[in-house]
Image (spheres, rainbow, N blue to C red):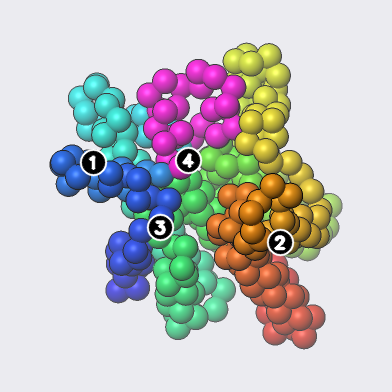
């Protein structure tokens, strides 16, 4: 349990990134306003905007609804109906911090269920000690999404499928990767019934919950912008993100990082075209790819289960 509380407060020990420095420009603002602003950078501002004004233009539809509407609800409660920007930021932190605590508890219990307490403790420690774990304390969806996802697999392993698929539905409304969580649960369900079609039972009906959540989101997109996939169009057209093969993404990142613009006075690799963090992004990509292949090797040697 001590590791859980360590994980909750560890992000505050990480120095703030340069991207948050602008939040401290007003030295005369109250300390609590500067603190909440520092932890509400980039996407956090968009979630606050959606909480206050809804999906008022096409750019906002790229962000899934559960997290910003939770901010709206909590913000209205703590501000007694007056959702100010400060109240929205405080509401985001009041969601993120408990969600991170729930994540650590569920992760510990899930690993205990699969292995033992020693392995579970190290797992939580490694998560909290990772250099980017401070995002679990920021007004971002990672904390809520990971808590829902880990909870999904924890309850699926315990064969509590109604709860597992209910959490999956909430994950679908939090991030688009929630759809992949639902697909992963189909594999877990197949494993539990021994891949025998004759053992299909009413638990299969619970998979309708994430499907219903996704259908509701598509319907909202259609009613608001006339296109059920408006969110995906916004991601591509406004935010410049599209589907690509993994090797295409890596090669493109390397090419842009070392590209020398013709009009540039000198060549500065990894410091042009807004690629200040390119070295870290590439190293993190290679690091997790390495972990993936290590895991595959351990599975092939029967040192860990595939699912």
Q: Secondary structure at mark 1?
A: loop
Estimate how packed mark 1 is, as few (under 14), some (14 to 19) or many (20 or more) residues with alpha carbons within 10 Å: few
Do we see residue 296 in this rendering?
yes
Query: Along the polypeptide, which appears first: circle 3 or circle 2?
Result: 3
Q: Magenta segment range?
A: 42-66
- CA distance for labels 3 and 1: 17 Å
- Residue 178 position by quadrant: top right
Look at mark 3 in the image and give the residue it sits on. 17
Query: Along the polypeptide, which appears first: circle 3 or circle 1?
Result: 3
Judge from the rendering whether residue 212 lies leftward or rightward of residue 118; answer left or right: right
Q: Secondary structure at mark 2?
A: helix
- CA distance for labels 4 and 3: 15 Å
- CA distance for labels 2 and 1: 36 Å
Residue 259: x %, y % from top left = 73, 57
For the point 61% across and 27% down, the residue is 217
Look at mark 2 in the image and give the residue it sits on. 258
The nearer-to-camera label among 3 and 2 is 2
- CA distance for labels 1 and 4: 21 Å
Q: Identify the main secondary structure in magenta.
A: helix
Q: Nearer the viewer, residue 76 or 303?
A: 76
Q: Secondary structure at mark 4?
A: helix
The nearer-to-camera label among 1 and 4 is 1
For the point 41% across and 36% down, the residue is 45
Look at mark 4 in the image and give the residue it sits on. 43
Q: Is residue 284 above or below residue 57?
A: below
Q: Are marks 4 and 3 in contact (CB under 8 Å)?
A: no
For the point 52% across and 72% down, the residue is 111
Residue 26, numbered circle: 1
């Amino acid at each position: 349990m001590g590791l859980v509380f360590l994980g909750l407060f560890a992000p505050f020990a990480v120095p703030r990134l340069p991207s948050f420095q602008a939040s401290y420009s007003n030295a005369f603002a109250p300390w609590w306003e500067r603190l909440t602003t520092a932890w509400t950078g980039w996407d956090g501002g968009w979630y606050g905007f959606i909480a206050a004004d809804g999906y008022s233009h096409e750019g906002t539809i790229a962000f899934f609804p559960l997290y910003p509407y939770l901010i709206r609800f909590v913000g209205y409660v703590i501000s007694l109906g007056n959702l100010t920007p400060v109240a929205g930021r405080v509401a985001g932190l009041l969601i993120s911090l408990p969600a991170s605590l729930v994540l650590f508890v569920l992760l510990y219990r899930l690993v205990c269920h699969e292995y033992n307490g020693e392995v579970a403790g190290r797992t939580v420690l490694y998560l909290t000690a990772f250099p980017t774990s401070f995002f679990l304390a920021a007004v971002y969806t990672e904390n809520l999404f990971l808590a829902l996802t880990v909870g999904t697999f924890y309850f699926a392993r315990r064969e509590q499928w109604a709860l597992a698929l209910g959490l999956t539905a909430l994950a679908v409304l939090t991030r688009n990767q929630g759809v992949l969580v639902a697909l992963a649960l189909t594999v877990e369900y197949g494993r539990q019934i021994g891949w025998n079609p004759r053992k299909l039972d009413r638990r299969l009906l619970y998979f309708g919950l994430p499907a219903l959540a996704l259908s509701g989101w598509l319907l909202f997109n259609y009613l608001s912008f006339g296109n059920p996939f408006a969110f995906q169009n916004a991601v591509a057209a406004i935010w410049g993100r599209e589907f690509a093969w993994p090797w295409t993404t890596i090669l493109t990142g390397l090419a842009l990082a070392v590209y020398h613009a013709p009009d540039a006075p000198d060549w500065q690799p990894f410091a042009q075209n807004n690629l200040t963090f390119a070295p870290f992004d590439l190293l993190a990509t290679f690091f997790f790819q390495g972990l993936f292949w290590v895991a595959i090797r351990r599975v092939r040697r029967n040192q860990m289960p595939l699912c």
